[in-house]
Image (cartoon, rainbow, N blue to C red):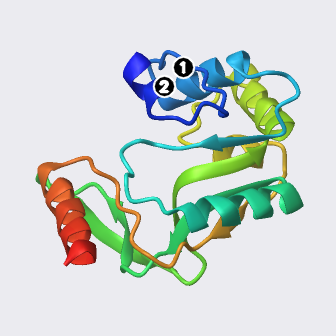
Amino acid sequence: ANDITKMVPDDVDVILVEGGEERRHSVQNALAKIPPETEIVFVHDCARPMIEAKSLTKLLSVAIETGGAALAHPVRDTLKQTREGQGPHPIADHTVDRSKLWAVETPQTFQAELLRKGMARAVSENLSVTDETSAVELLGHPVSLVDPGYPNPKVTTPSDLSYIEFLINKDNA
């Protein structure tokens, strides 16, 4: 923990919070620790290491204006709704219209009180939300989606790590 705080400038307050069993628990732990006067909260998944400062600036301005914003990309792949097959492979049932679909990423940025209320609603209704936009949507509050204009991949497999290394080396070539 001390290694992390050494990398942050002295004029930045750092509060280290223990993670939870699931992401929503980690976010709830963090919301419980931040000062009540905190206005804006960024939630970022460390599995997305390619974030650029310009995206943080954009998310901040959009969250101040609208209440919530998340990095996202329009879906470009063809998506299939499936049904159970006879073997181990699902059967494509029909194609989903992707024209209004976006893949949501992190960081996700919110007015702190809005996120607190959304997470509290998820808990009170015993809903398992997979990200913070889902919690805020429970309140009927829209969340703006911001396309960063560059890849923001998530590292979950060895091949993902290879892709990250490629992106880093490409930028340093």
Point out residue 131 in the picture as x, y percentages from the top left corner: 57, 43
Is residue 34 shown above or below 119? Answer: above
Q: Residues within 10 Å of mark 1 (few under 14, many from 20)?
A: few
Question: Residue at the spot x=84%, y=39% of the render?
Answer: 39
- Tell whether 28 sits left or right of 21: right
Residue type marked 1: Leu
Residue type marked 2: Thr
Residue 1 visible? The answer is no
Q: Which quadrant would residue 112 be assigned to in this image?
A: top right
Q: Are marks 1 and 2 in contact (CB under 8 Å)?
A: yes
Residue where numbered disc 2 is placed? 5
Is residue 94 shown above or below 89? Answer: below
Question: Residue at the spot x=39%, y=71% of the render?
Answer: 151
Element at label 2: helix
Q: How many marks?
A: 2
Point out residue 26 in the picture as x, y percentages from the top left corner: 54, 24
Quadrant the C terminus occupies? bottom left
Question: Residue at the spot x=25%, y=70% of the render?
Answer: 167
Q: Which quadrant would residue 56 be assigned to in this image?
A: bottom right
Element at label 1: loop
